[in-house]
Image: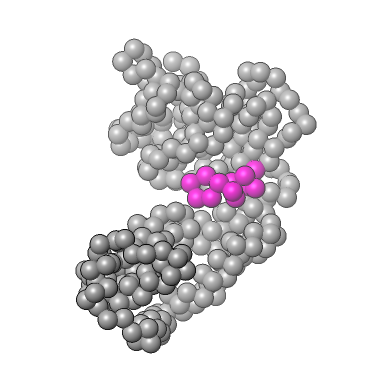
């Protein structure tokens, strides 16, 4: 066993299995204090050449990086085990010793990700929140030995925005997105701050992280059925929106109305048998639908503890 086969942190040990049976594709995790296994082994699709564990945060936040035989760099959450590719043509990678930053030699150029977790949320922001030293070539098979200290460059604003979103610090995220001229994301945050309750904001943040099912579950658990239906309408998940409307016996006409508006704007005709059948059975009164939607918005604003984001 060599250094590339072992990942160590203060609470976790990662071991790369080698040999004919494993094929070098399996990583096992152990509790550093007790030696007991942590979850099931992680299985990669290709032979793994190197692994490392992040050094900061709690055991539930621990991250593994791996470089496989194609020289692709992946990051994997120890708890969630959902790998995401960070880069190709990678010779070496190393976690910062006191922060969550990650450095790698990518195509013989030094690349530093200030917040690599953003790969799970927004790859556009990930690209903006990294530092690339393009004027230095390190040669083939170079290896990073030490990664300490701090870097200063404009991508720090993008990093701040990503970290602020992850920690629900919306005022900080708003300022940071403005600095990097991310207009769409800035408008999203400004609109998010107007949502009158924490559950709705958490659902929108889950949607921002591209987890629509989690967002829906948050809303349903909070009793915000209309907002859950509307979420699916916004995502064009028409069947799911109708499922919820029928399950809770509310806003069926709202779903049909939005569907008709969508098809009208797209110059399309209804082809979904469920909607065809319901259109023949349910009378749609636009004024009633709009009034019902407004009543839902008023009821949300008057929920106990409802308050727009101000902190």
Residue at (49% x, 20% y) in the render: 69
Give the overall secondary structure of the magenta segment. helix
Using the rendered view, name the quadrant where residue 92 is placed: top right
Q: Which residues are magenta?
A: 119-130
The residue furthest right is: 135
Using the rendered view, name the quadrant where residue 135 is placed: top right
Relative placement, left or right, of 260 versus 133 is left
The quadrant of the image that shows the C terminus is bottom right
Residue at (47% x, 39% y) in the render: 84
Confirm whether the magenta stretch covers residue 22: no
Percent position (x, y) of residue 198? 43, 71
Percent position (x, y) of residue 98? 58, 41
Q: Nearer the viewer, residue 288 or 308?
A: 288
Indicate how the structure is coloured in the image: one colour
Using the rendered view, name the quadrant where residue 81 is placed: top left
| Res. 252 visible in picture | yes
Residue at (64% x, 38% y) in the render: 112
Q: Nearer the viewer, residue 174 or 35?
A: 174
Residue at (67% x, 63% y) in the render: 178
Percent position (x, y) of residue 264? 43, 70
Q: Nearer the viewer, residue 61 or 220?
A: 220
Percent position (x, y) of residue 78? 40, 39
Relative placement, left or right, of 46 versus 220 is right
């Amino acid at each position: 066993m060599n250094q590339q086969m072992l990942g160590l942190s203060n609470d976790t040990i990662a071991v790369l299995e080698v040999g004919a049976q494993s094929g070098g594709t399996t990583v096992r995790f152990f509790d550093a204090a007790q030696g007991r296994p942590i979850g099931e082994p992680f299985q990669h699709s290709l032979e793994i050449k190197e692994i490392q564990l992040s050094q900061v945060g709690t055991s539930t936040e621990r991250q593994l990086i791996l470089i496989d035989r194609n020289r692709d760099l992946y990051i994997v959450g120890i708890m969630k085990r959902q790998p995401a590719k960070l880069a190709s043509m990678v010779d070496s990678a190393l976690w910062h010793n006191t922060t969550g930053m990650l450095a790698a030699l990518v195509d013989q150029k030094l690349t530093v990700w200030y917040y690599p977790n953003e790969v799970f949320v927004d790859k556009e922001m990930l690209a903006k929140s990294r530092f690339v030293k393009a004027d230095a070539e390190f040669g083939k098979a170079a290896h990073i030995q030490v990664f300490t200290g701090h870097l200063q460059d404009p991508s720090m604003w993008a990093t701040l925005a990503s970290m602020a979103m992850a920690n629900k610090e919306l005022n900080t995220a708003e300022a940071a997105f403005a600095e990097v001229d991310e207009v769409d994301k800035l408008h999203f945050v400004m609109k998010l701050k107007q949502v009158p309750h924490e559950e709705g904001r958490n659902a929108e943040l889950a949607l921002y992280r591209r987890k629509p099912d989690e967002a829906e579950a948050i809303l349903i658990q909070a009793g915000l059925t209309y907002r859950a239906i509307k979420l699916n309408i916004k995502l064009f998940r028409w069947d799911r929106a109708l499922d919820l409307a029928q399950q809770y016996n509310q806003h069926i006409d709202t779903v049909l109305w939005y569907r008709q508006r969508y098809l009208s704007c797209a110059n399309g005709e209804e082809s979904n048998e469920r909607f065809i059948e319901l259109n023949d059975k349910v009378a749609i009164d636009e004024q009633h639908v709009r009034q019902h939607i407004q009543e839902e918005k008023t009821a949300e604003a008057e929920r106990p503890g409802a308050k727009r984001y101000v902190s």
